[in-house]
Structure formats: C-alpha cells, structure tokens
Amino acid sequence: QVQLVESGGGLVQPGGSLRLSCAASGSILSINPMGWYRQAPGKERELVASITSGGSTTYADSVKGRFTISRDNAKNTVYLQMSGLKPEDTAVYSCKMGVRTHLLRYLEVWGQGTLVTVSS
C-alpha cells in the first residue's frame, strides 16, 4: 500500500509565494512520474506540472515562468514552488504519482489535496 501526504497550502496574497510538498510512503520501488494537478471551483481538474524520474518537466501554459516542480528521489517527495500567485491560481492542489511497488505492481496514487487560496 502506498500513501501520499501533502502539505503547504494556505492563504496568500496576490503576488505571493507558497511551496507545496507531497511525500510518498509504503512499498515503493520507484516513482515515475510525479505531478501536481489542481481543480478550481466549477472547473475541471487540470495538470499543473509533472516531472519524470530523469528530471524532465512539463508545465501548464498558465503557470510557466511562475511555478517550479522538483523532486527528491531519496525522500520520495515532490515539490511545487509557486510564485507570482494570482487569484486564478486558487484551487485544490493534488499530487499524483506513478508508483512501482516492491511486488512490481504499478499504481497511480493521489494525495488528499490541499487548498491554495490567493486573495487580498
């Protein structure tokens, strides 16, 4: 069994910064990819950013130049550094990981979600 625990959400003023973290625990052999998604009220969930085990990254056009995704393979953790936050970034942010377990099963695992609110 694999679990993801997120942290770092909260209320921030426009133009501010936040860093989200998502740590995986359990029977983990490898993780590829790691990603962050978000869902704003009344909207569909969208991919914000993803990173492969080799460090290749993908970003939504709306966050390019403002958000940075990174990972610490030793800690099975993915981060999302968000700067220049805008009210339209307000959403529930969830991490997702593709996990290969010690039994060689491949699981897509989601975190519980953390709310980011950008408001003055």
Image: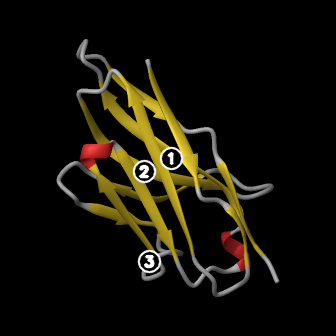
Q: What amino acid type should be assigned to the residue bearing mark 2? A: Gly
Q: Which residue is mark 2?
A: 35
What crowding class fits label 2: few (fewer than 14 Cα within 10 Å), some (14-19), or many (20 or more)?
Answer: many
> Element under label 3?
loop
Q: How many marks?
A: 3
> Which of the two discs, 1 and 2, labels the residue nearer the N terminus?
2
Amino acid carrying mark 1 in the image: Cys
C-alpha span from label 3 to label 2: 15 Å
Residue that extends furthest to the left in the rendered view of this protein: 54
Name the residue beneath numbered marker 1: 95
Q: State the residue at coordinates (66%, 51%).
A: 114
Residue 64 has which mark? 3
Under mark 3, the amino acid is: Lys
**Which residue is at the front of the view, 72 or 117?**
72
Task: State which tag comes first along the sequence, 3 or 2.
Answer: 2
Q: Give the CA distance from mark 1 to mark 2.
A: 6 Å
**Front label number (3 vs 1):** 1
Return the x and y of residue 80 as percentages of the image width and height.
46, 63
Tag 1 near tag 2, CB within 8 Å: yes
Mark positioned earlier in the residue sequence (3 or 1): 3
Q: Residue furthest top?
A: 103
User: How far from the left and from the top, in percent, is residue 93?
Assistant: 61, 54
| Residue 53 drawn above or below residue 79 | above
**Disc 3 crowd, CA 10 A, few/some/many (<14, 14-19, 20+):** few
Q: Residue at left 82%, top 83%?
A: 120
Q: Going by the image, does 59 lie left or right of 4? A: left
Q: Is residue 26 above or below residue 73?
A: above
